[in-house]
Image: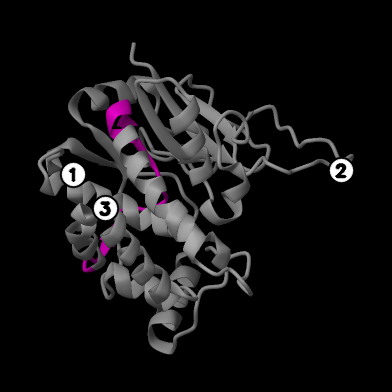
Amino acid sequence: MKDIKIIVATHKKYEMPKDDIYYPVHVGAEGKTDKKGNPLDFGYTKDNSGENISKLNYCFGEQTGLYWAWKNLDADYLGLVHYRRYFVGKKVDRDNRLDSILTRKQLEPLLSKYKVIVPRKRNYYISTVYEQYASTMNGGKEELDLTRMIVSELTPQYLKAFDTYMHCRGGFIFNMMVMPRNLINDYCGWLFTILLELYNRVDQTGMSDFDKRFCGRISERLFNVWLIHMIETGCLSPGDIKELPYTEDVNWPKKVGSFLSAKLFAKKYGASF
């Protein structure tokens, strides 16, 4: 039996899958208290234990959970999903989504054939990755340009992959994946080097809470950069990557409308959809 731990990143008490591959983690636990002033406790592992960056959750989002898992969990395979978003193992049951999520029995054969499990690719169609982020996020262009500068300074071998991905018209988002430990170590070692430097260089004065989550959003783009680099260098092949559907409720009319407003009228996002 493979030793698999897929953390379920959550900031609230929620119904969790029973399959033993899932490991609920309270992300952003540092400093959170209940109404009585006691440390907030949902009964899940907290991301402020062991080696952690829990206090940066407001900027990094679920990636504080990934960092915690990388540094503190001993498993052959690690992954990340969200408390309301999972990989699907069969057709989605709209009435009981937990019955639809990927199980150990369904995942283990995939891990014998593939090295990276990712959510089905999202396409932007009318925009490149760079254009989509720059047009929808306050400070988006500046954040991407600064990220490119940091990549060129700290890991210049990834610059070609960064530029390649910025010209793509879609990619794997949500920071969801399942990978063997050696790939997790490679990815996280690179990712958090870039993100922590980005965090230190961005002036957050006057930013809204939504805009302050830039490190979490940039990391979605960087995952794709890492994959492209791994393929370019022969460490992975396209056939090593398996896309899976995922559970998600999306208000598509609102999402598409907001994207077009940003694209055509420079109206930036102010909330997640």
Mark before the other along the chain sequence, 2 or 3: 2
Q: Residue furthest right?
A: 36
Q: Residue at x 58, y 49 (%)?
A: 57
- Pointer 3: what residue? 155
Q: Look at the picture and state if 13 lies above or below 56.
A: above
Amino acid marked by disc 3 = Thr
Q: Secondary structure at mark 3?
A: loop
Please, what is the three-letter code of the amino acid marked with disc 2?
Lys
Badge 3, how many Cα within 10 Å: few under 14, some, many 20+? few
- Quadrant where the N terminus sits is top left
Judging by the rendered image, the residue that carries numbered circle 2 is 35
Q: Is residue 138 magenta?
A: no
Q: Is residue 181 magenta?
A: yes
Indicate the position of residue 243 as horizontal and vertical percent values: 26, 43
Mark 2–mark 3 distance (CA, rounded to whole Å): 45 Å
Q: Residues within 10 Å of mark 1 (few under 14, many from 20)?
A: some
Q: Which residues are magenta?
A: 167-184
Callout 1–callout 2 Cβ contact below 8 Å:
no
**Nearer the viewer's eye, disc 1 or disc 2?**
1
Return the x and y of residue 95 as percentages of the image width and height.
54, 40
Q: Which mark is residue 230?
A: 1
Of 167 and 171, the residue lying toward us: 167
Residue type indicated by callout 1: Met
